Amino acid sequence: STTTWLGIDTRILDNFALAFLTTLHSLASPPLVLSVSWGSSEQYSVGYLRRVDYEMAKTAIRGLTVIIASGDDGNNAVGQDCSLSGDLLASSPWVTSVGASELAADSEPYCQQADYAGFPCDDRRPRPVVCSTTGGAAITSGGYFSMYRARPWYQKKAVEAYMDA
């Protein structure tokens, strides 16, 4: 299968979500599955969140699948009080949010870099591993409940069971 890379102008990073989505919608034949490893706190205006969700809904209507990183290093703690916040894209009901993975430290390209000297390079095949602090990962998976988006009906029982535990 073909891999397609979408480049987004880094000067509009604060509006990355809309820049990404509008770029995607401008393509006549977009990729059918998109993987996005970018995140930001959902501390935007409710109008902005609605617009992002509207654009995400358009991806679903087009038959596209959007896989979003659930968030690095736990929830998006923001502000001086470190208040908890969901992720802007990962908390959208129009995406599938997944946990973090990274290339194993003993596989290429890592094992050839000076920073990784001393790591065994027995298995040079690039392969993903689940990010965890016990595995020596630089990041971990995360996520948090959206503060602004309604919980989808199909998550009701699972979330209630989690909260009761």
Image (cartoon, grey):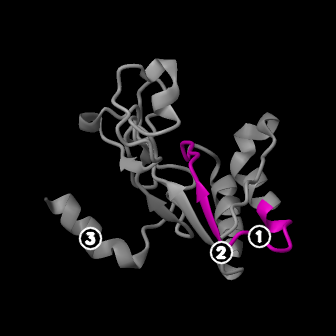
Q: Nearer the viewer, residue 165 or 1?
A: 1
Q: Position of residue 40 (x, y in %)?
A: 57, 42
Please state the horizontal and vertical placement of residue 105, each as a whole percent of the image: 40, 35
The answer for how far apart the CA atoms under marks 2 and 1 are is: 8 Å
Residue 112 showing in the rendered view = yes
Which residue type does callout 3 highlight?
Ala
Q: Which residue is mark 1?
A: 30
Q: Which residues are magenta?
A: 24-42
* Mark 3 or 1, nearer chain start: 1
The residue drawn where x is 62% and y is 54% is 46
Question: Any mark on residue 158, and which?
Answer: 3
Where is residue 100 shown, x and y percent of the image? 42, 48
| Relative depth, front residue between 39 and 77 | 39
Count how many numbered circles sit on residues in the image.
3
Q: Tell me the distance, in whole angstroms, between the alpha carbons under discs 3 and 1.
A: 34 Å
Q: In front: 78, or 99? A: 99
The answer to whether marks 2 and 1 mark residues whose Cβ atoms lie closer than 8 Å is yes
| Residue type marked 1 | Pro
Dot 2 falls on a residue whose secondary structure is loop
Magenta stretch: includes residue 72: no
Give the residue at mark 2.
64
For mark 2, does the 10 Å Cα neighbourhood hold few (<14), some (14 to 19), or many (20 or more) residues?
A: some
